[in-house]
Amino acid sequence: MGTMKRKPIIAVVYNLMMALATAALGAVVLSWPLLAIFVKAQKTDLIVRKSLGTIMKNYTQLLDYLLLPFKNKLQMSDFPTSPSAARHFYECKLLFELAIIVFIVGLIILIFLKMRKRMNYIYISKTTALIFMILPVIILPFALMNFDEFFISFHHLLFNNSDWLFDPTTDPIINVLTEEFFAGCFATGGIIYELYFSYFILTKK
């Protein structure tokens, strides 16, 4: 009886962690083409006086630092990084590495259970999936009405310092990483999160 009760809890925790990790990693990977779109649309290349190719090269260097575990030093060839910005990017790197670990471990568990034909251990009901899909929708009106306030609250939740407040004069990269770009990244992550749980609603069991 105890095992039966534990199964739904395990499934809920597993899928919530996997959904968040998948959304975070998917959003950061898709942020590369997203940035190119926003640079052209907002003409931020004119503000920093760099070509689109140069901006994307430097953003690739930033993503490499954030996502590759053995990349220990952030070095953008055409954008300087202040000590406070470097600390913030390091904290972001730790969060993304945590997401990578969760995703890889979750994938291993998924493959193992599929091979053992024990997928019921991580399967959640349509009702549970629907609840998880509704939760972000509750936050959506607040985010749409005042993304700036939402963005600040998000950083206060994840970080215990103000290193995320960049000065454009010392960290010009922030001129291309605009509020609208970050809003697009959040939207991308939200869509991936919703798609993850929609699988349980659309599939038959």
Image: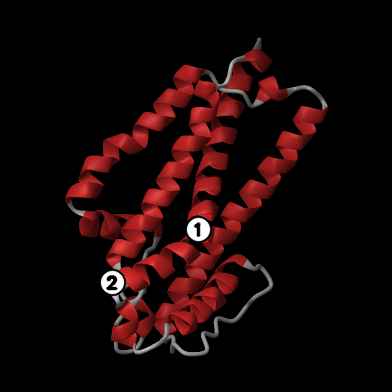
Question: From mark 2 to mark 1, how far is it between C-alphas?
Answer: 18 Å
Q: Viewer-proximal residue, 204 or 138?
A: 204
**Which quarter of the picture shows residue 15?**
top right
Q: Which mark, by number, is residue 30? A: 1
Q: Nearer the viewer, residue 20 or 55?
A: 55
Where does the N terminus fall, quadrant-wise?
top right
Could you tell me which residue is drawn at 46 percent across and 76 percent down? 87
Of residues 120 and 87, the one drawn nearer to the viewer in this rendering: 120
- Residue in view at x 66 percent, y 68 percent: 69
Label 1: which secondary element: helix
Instruction: Please determine whether, in this image, residue 123 is positioned above or below residue 80.
Output: above
Circles 2 and 1: CB atoms closer than 8 Å: no
Image quarter in which the C terminus is found: top right
Q: Secondary structure at mark 2?
A: helix
User: Mark 2 sits on what residue?
Assistant: 42
Residue 87 in view here: yes
Residue 51 at x, y = what percent? 42, 85
* Residue at the spot 44% in from the left edge and 87% down from the top edge: 79
Residue 64 in the image, given as x and y percentages of width and height: 59, 72
Give, as a three-letter code, the residue at label 2. Gln
Vertical relation: 115 (above or below) 81: above
Image position of 203 (left or right of 179) = right
Between 64 and 128, the residue placed more toward the observer is 64
Badge 1: few (under 14), some or many (20 or more) residues near its Cα, within 10 Å? Answer: some
Amino acid type assigned to the residue bearing label 1 in the image: Leu
